[in-house]
Amino acid sequence: MTKLGVAAVFLAGFAALDHQWHPGSAGFAARVATASAQTADARGSDATYVGSVKCQSCHAETYARWSKTRMANVVRDPRAHPDAIIPDLSKPDPLVTFTKDDIAFVYGSKWKQRYFTRIGDDYFPLGAQWDVTHKVWRRYFVPPDTDWWVRFYPADNLKRPTGPTCDGCHSVNYDVRTHRVTEWNVGCEKCHGPGSAHVANPSRANIVNPARLDPVHAQRRLHPVPFAGTAAEESDRGTSLRLAGRFPRGRNHESSRFLAAR
């Protein structure tokens, strides 16, 4: 088969998937109901989140691999991990108007590292980020019309909380009302759902396996929609539904359409 033929097959497949999960397609409501049942059955109605460390005893090799990934370490607390801050903050730079004591979390370690301070029960970005590749400080500020949430907040980093904009994707079991998480970063339960029932009685029937889910639910677990992801949908469904129509097509558009159709 030629490259053009292979491309045509892939495009036809994606078009079929797109049509299958379009709210206006035949049988869409039934497919959504089936998908919801799959997730509910696998998750277990009484299951709660317990944290990735509970998975270690049975899945030691997988846990060891995961614990060394950036997925498990992109958000770090410098108080718990003194080596988390990459640059030397003792060297003055006009962009750096904060100290080590101001940093509650760092984000990133490969290309860039950003810094967040805690005010009340939420976190806010500080005004400089470290360019890891070039070893220089750069300003950090999200300009207008560059991300979905910018229009809803003032042009001031300390008035742009990470709770409703970032934390739902970078934690497990983020609650938009209490701002609490089971754990930061993409832990086991981010994709596999609350694991208490599975820890107590390991079974394929009481844990989520994204490979067994339909495309919409699998994507929602691996790439949750913005505005605190699934947590926002569950804790503030009205807000999620209002925002669903504003997501650009191409990124999480299957999830957005699923939300809008519920």
Image (tube, grey):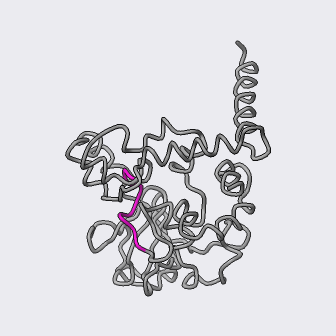
Q: Is residue 252 above or below residue 182?
A: above
Taking 56 as reference, is 151 left or right?
Answer: right
Q: Residue at x 27, y 67 (%)?
A: 81
Q: Residue at x 75, y 43 (%)?
A: 22
Taking 224 as reference, is 81 left or right?
Answer: left
Residue 87 painted magenta? no
Q: Is residue 249 above or below residue 231?
A: above
Q: Residue at x 33, y 47 (%)?
A: 66
Q: Residue at x 67, y 51 (%)?
A: 258
Taking 259 as reference, is 83 left or right?
Answer: left
Spot occupied by residue 32 in the image (x, y as percentages of width and height): 63, 45
Q: Is residue 231 above or below residue 178?
A: above
- Taking depth in this image into account, of 35 and 168 the one nearest to the observer is 35
Farthest residue, direction right: 24
Farthest residue, direction left: 57
Q: Is residue 219 above or below residue 124?
A: above
Residue 185 painted magenta? yes
Question: In the figure, residue 3 lies in which quadrant?
Answer: top right
Give the main secondary structure, helix, strand or loop, of the magenta stretch.
Answer: loop
Spot occupied by residue 149 in the image (x, y as percentages of width and height): 66, 70
Taking 221 as reference, is 155 left or right?
Answer: right
- Taking depth in this image into account, of 54 and 46 the one nearest to the observer is 46
Spot occupied by residue 137 in the image (x, y as percentages of width and height): 50, 71
Residue segment shown in magenta: 180-189
- Taking depth in this image into account, of 9 and 54 the one nearest to the observer is 54
Question: In the figure, residue 132 lies in which quadrant?
Answer: bottom left
Spot occupied by residue 123 in the image (x, y as percentages of width and height): 46, 78
Q: Quadrant of the C terminus?
A: bottom right
